[in-house]
Amino acid sequence: MRLRAPVSLQTEECIGCHIIATPGIVKDWQSSRHSRIVPAQALKKKILARRVSSDSIPEVLSKVAVGCYECHGQNTDNHADSFEHNGHTINVVVSPVDCSTCHTVEARQFSGSKKAMAYRNLVDNPLYMTLADSILGHKTWVDGELTAAVASSNALRETCLGCHGTRVEVRGMKTIDTDLLGEIQVPDLSGWPNVGVGRVNPDGSFGSCTACHPRHSFSIEIARKPYTCAQCHVEPDTPAWDVYKESKHGNIYLSKKEEWDFDSVPWVLGEDFTAPTCSVCHNSLITNPDGDLLAERTHDFGSRLWVRLFSLIYSHPQPRKGDVTIIRNADGLPLPTTFAGDPATEYLIDEADQKRRKEKMTAVCGGCHSTDWYTGHFAKMDRTIEEVDRMILTATQVMQSAWDAGVADGSNPFGEAIEKRWALQWLFYANSIKYSSAMTGAPDYATFKNGWWEMSRNLEEMKEMIEQKKSTQYPVPSSQ
Amino acid sequence: MRLRAPVSLQTEECIGCHIIATPGIVKDWQSSRHSRIVPAQALKKKILARRVSSDSIPEVLSKVAVGCYECHGQNTDNHADSFEHNGHTINVVVSPVDCSTCHTVEARQFSGSKKAMAYRNLVDNPLYMTLADSILGHKTWVDGELTAAVASSNALRETCLGCHGTRVEVRGMKTIDTDLLGEIQVPDLSGWPNVGVGRVNPDGSFGSCTACHPRHSFSIEIARKPYTCAQCHVEPDTPAWDVYKESKHGNIYLSKKEEWDFDSVPWVLGEDFTAPTCSVCHNSLITNPDGDLLAERTHDFGSRLWVRLFSLIYSHPQPRKGDVTIIRNADGLPLPTTFAGDPATEYLIDEADQKRRKEKMTAVCGGCHSTDWYTGHFAKMDRTIEEVDRMILTATQVMQSAWDAGVADGSNPFGEAIEKRWALQWLFYANSIKYSSAMTGAPDYATFKNGWWEMSRNLEEMKEMIEQKKSTQYPVPSSQ
Amino acid sequence: MRLRAPVSLQTEECIGCHIIATPGIVKDWQSSRHSRIVPAQALKKKILARRVSSDSIPEVLSKVAVGCYECHGQNTDNHADSFEHNGHTINVVVSPVDCSTCHTVEARQFSGSKKAMAYRNLVDNPLYMTLADSILGHKTWVDGELTAAVASSNALRETCLGCHGTRVEVRGMKTIDTDLLGEIQVPDLSGWPNVGVGRVNPDGSFGSCTACHPRHSFSIEIARKPYTCAQCHVEPDTPAWDVYKESKHGNIYLSKKEEWDFDSVPWVLGEDFTAPTCSVCHNSLITNPDGDLLAERTHDFGSRLWVRLFSLIYSHPQPRKGDVTIIRNADGLPLPTTFAGDPATEYLIDEADQKRRKEKMTAVCGGCHSTDWYTGHFAKMDRTIEEVDRMILTATQVMQSAWDAGVADGSNPFGEAIEKRWALQWLFYANSIKYSSAMTGAPDYATFKNGWWEMSRNLEEMKEMIEQKKSTQYPVPSSQ
């Protein structure tokens, strides 16, 4: 039997109804650590075994389980979505600020990450929104032309913002009809439900912890398993999971995971797991079997990364800050590289910082691999990034020649068939190869599936599209 | 040790040889509940815990395990595939009618479903067969033209009928050479082996229970796991599994399934499982932890569905009946909507029925989610269906303009390259987005992978195909 | 507690440092059978339960665990990569020759297989390298033309040679900086790290056992799980795993694998597993529950195969030898069939051998399936191969007509957009259908996903590409 910690009177009331109204939520919470240990106990663990990072926790919260009211009743004054519900003021949306009561360090790290900014980094970048509109804008067929509209908020929410997060705003109150209580008043929220990682919350904060620690079990186990990452980091644009599962690491994970311990803190290399998952390399606190620290926990998910594999439109050093809306390349575009490949250096981390971050990552690699092995690995990756970026450059030159010849209209660089071919080169194909290289996995992703095969074929088809367009627009003189 | 129930004399004889001839079958059966409990005992369970639904079971069957002979020896008079085998008359193919001896309700529900009609709904629809022929018909290259044949029965069996089921007919008897007995006589069956869900059996019945309860373990566990559904409901046309595995529900399933109980009847939300699989939402008997019914078991797999997401060529209310060959749209075509999007209303369920069915589904959602959450979810889905169907309409208009201009020949609407582009819009891309919306999962399927990205790109490429064809056929006058 | 076998003094020294330097390796080895049993004991097992196949093992090795030094210290005289490391001469790369000390039979079988020759069979085939160059060669855009280079060694290593294996050569010694020892001297290896199955090792041997028995656990369990095969045998060219996971066999594997025993030797059908994985059918030693042999172990992975499904450019009988570089078709090309489909018979196994091999495979099928079932299955497969190969022939005829008309330049048959379309037909689409047929799985791969749908669509688009090219090159006279 799992023991349960004492619960607050408020939470007891919540459970009294919700065990009937939504028993799945209650059961999920009962399976959680939140229901079994009170913060005061959690604070007493040794430092490397701690799951709470705040130095102190308010008295009223520290002696009871972290229940319904302890989370939904936090900071209600700052929540535009707070409302009266059966005698209690609660918030619909629990935000990272609420979680930070106990998990201060994680919330702070996260708040500076690109993940926390995922909504703004997309929506506040006019070039990315041009791309989004060219994909999601409704198209009509009038007189042999396709006319395009801007993306609807619904389409954005179902696509980009499914991962990036929505802006959740309170439009007022509304009446809904419930089985248990009949009609009740609840806040009427836009962009809701949504658990995207960069969600803008009604308390003004950014992010959604439940994106990775889902629902009411708040599980570290689920967050450490790659299926969580695989909700968003999948092909064709960011094929991290796809590549991982076909790598040696992924093979070992899939073959042996039932014997591993995904709940242990600290997470011990060689004992709790024998091959990395996403979280091992990118953010978990890892020790060796002797208890020595290999990597500190971080919720700034890019902080062990030096190069940004993701092509925009070439790879480049990681941005200095999580907020990348400020970046302007030498051509004034909100991109970290120019179309010719020059990085927007002042917004990107310098070599010293790259080196520091690489050392953080390779400290994990070194848990199982010799220095020569991982050095060879990353040298290979560097060379691959360079080769692939050159193939992007060629595609950009082909594209530019089409713009120059007037067979494509560059005013919207994503609006025509050939322009989407160009985007395929960097957004899908280049990334597939780079991710495959980074995990020494999935040679098929590097080769035939969205990799080199497609990069070459795409160039050849782009060339033919241009020739065809030229022939259509400027027919060969009849005298020939 | 698992106890075994007493077996009939006939089954004992079967096992005597088959433990040598095909030990895997025998072992599989020995692992099954059929081998461990006799029907008379099964009938004594409390109603929600029962796995047999017949009110009474023939005396001769009720006291012995459900063994080889009990299934293969049923209703032999009605089976064209019955034959003498070592002194017993048995059938090769066990049909839903045979299973209905103990599982009456399930067989009856199933017999009225689209699944049971899966063979006929395809093969008896001339338009769908035109599509099948345009895909599967052998093509020859003669004088710069592709000439097409109709699909071979073999090609159909390997593709569409792999899921939909074949028509299994007895062509006579044949002699085969076996290791154990040397030459023996067995029925010579067409379309065999096949375990497609709508198989037409030699006893005239429709369906194959083994499609989901596979082989000789007849496992409820396997049927409840999504891998069973994933044999057929996969991308690019019906990406249910693909979307599910990248949804939050799928993430939790993949992370926690080893702790769940997939064999329990009734299936208790919050205890036996903490996130839905396909069968939770679509057909299983679900109770809350107090034992109250949340959803009744159904083997009419569409009966908790109101809207048919699957685009034919637009979404529409579910058909009234499992037999959809009777449907005719306003243009006389055997389709539930016209090319312009008008539903064939008289063949589709009405609003009251839609509401009833939606309530059945949301009763399951409500086990874990607040009313506001799932209401918001389905509102989003409705809007997405509408937006996606408008993108299908645009593609249809582009297609129509090609037919009107004579650059494509609409007599077979699926026979040319541009026509297959049109089909991509509704058959692959629209479905991907709709399924993704329905499970709030897999933003990548809605966005880049077979989703909005492809819908837009496809329209742009269709436009260029038309322009190219026009230019080829009607060259610009030389004076220009 | 798992007992550990006594270790040699040398291995004890290795572990003394490496438990600090690379604890993950040590822990992995400690989890292995190599650490728990000495060869002398392993030799005493009954013949079907043995995991070592050498008749005798050198005295010095037989009484200690198979530790670091026992593998890395083998045959150092023959290893160009041997070097002094803290007082011991060791090799970086452990090769199949080293493993053969205990696993003679496996090493010998493997050495004759296509897998062992995977590097050479690719790199020493000029036609395949033309294909590789056309995919991987860097392309530049000069005056409206794409100019192509040959593939870089880095690109080859990241793609084809990721699975096929690299040639690992010693370029000299180099100094590296390690955490524990500071600067040390190690061999400077080209093509390293790499664990491709046909790797050419510094001792001159071919192959990499760790490709399937990964890292330092040398696990038979991992090798038997399909995730190992799925590192290489995946879509789009060889979609074995993709098809398997959507087959009935794959469904049962994914649903029930936690209850199976993947470590047992012999591997007992019906007890240790209830549906096949890749290794059951292709190479494992399988017995029935009575202990009778159903299939002998083989590490010549093609030896239970008669037909080679993989289209080059049509299916054909398996090659006689693992070294296929010697094959020449009737047109003098290094291909097992001509462009017209004629097999290079003298290099391929004859009918008697095909029959023998098919009997080996069907002995496994017969463990669970009746003679009629699997006979019907393979008859279906034969017909499908024939039908699909005819669709390849049509594509080849379309391609030939383009070469004949001068709208494509056949001097490099893979260098242009339309030529890659032709390759799609046999390399991706045909294989998808054939693999799907072979496993009676994944009707979607046979139908819509890389199957018949794509084969037909591809022919139609190839036709249009030719028409477009003709119209561009030879404009219609202006008088029309």
Image (spheres, coloured by chain):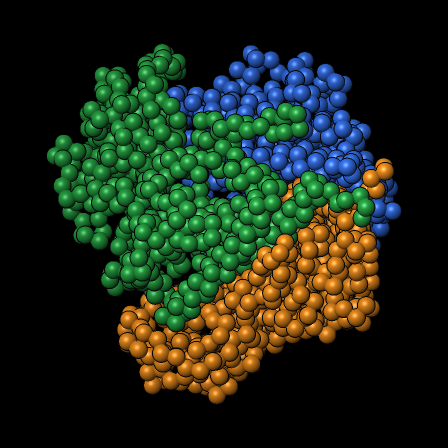
Chain colours: A blue, B orange, C green
Q: Residue at x 22, y 20 (%)?
A: C88
Give the camera-side residue of A61 and C32. Answer: C32
B271 or C15: nearer the viewer: C15
Residue B133 in the image: state x and y as whole percent: 62, 64
Q: Residue furthest left?
A: C59
User: Does residue B116 show up?
Assistant: yes
Residue depicted at x 39% and y 44%: C332
Question: Looking at the picture, does residue A281 appear above or below residue B118?
Answer: above
Quarter in which the C terminus of chain B is drawn:
top right
Q: Given the current orientation, which residue lies at the most extreme bottom position? A: B77
Q: Report whether B311 appears left or right of C313.
A: right
Q: Position of residue B191 (x, y in %)?
A: 50, 72
Which quadrant, please, contains the N terminus of chain B?
Answer: bottom left
Residue A34 seen from this side:
no
Up/down of B442 relative to C392, above or below: above
**Dividing the picture into quarters, in which one does residue B448 lie?**
top right
Residue at image coords 47%, 49%: C339
Residue at the (50%, 47%) spot, across then down: C427
**What is the count of numbered marks?**
0
State the image coordinates of residue A16 (x, y, percent, origin top left).
68, 51
C334 displayed left or right of A476: left
Observer-nearest of B421 and B205: B421
Q: Which percent across, then down, holds residue C263?
A: 32, 48
State the image quarter where residue A426 is shown: top right
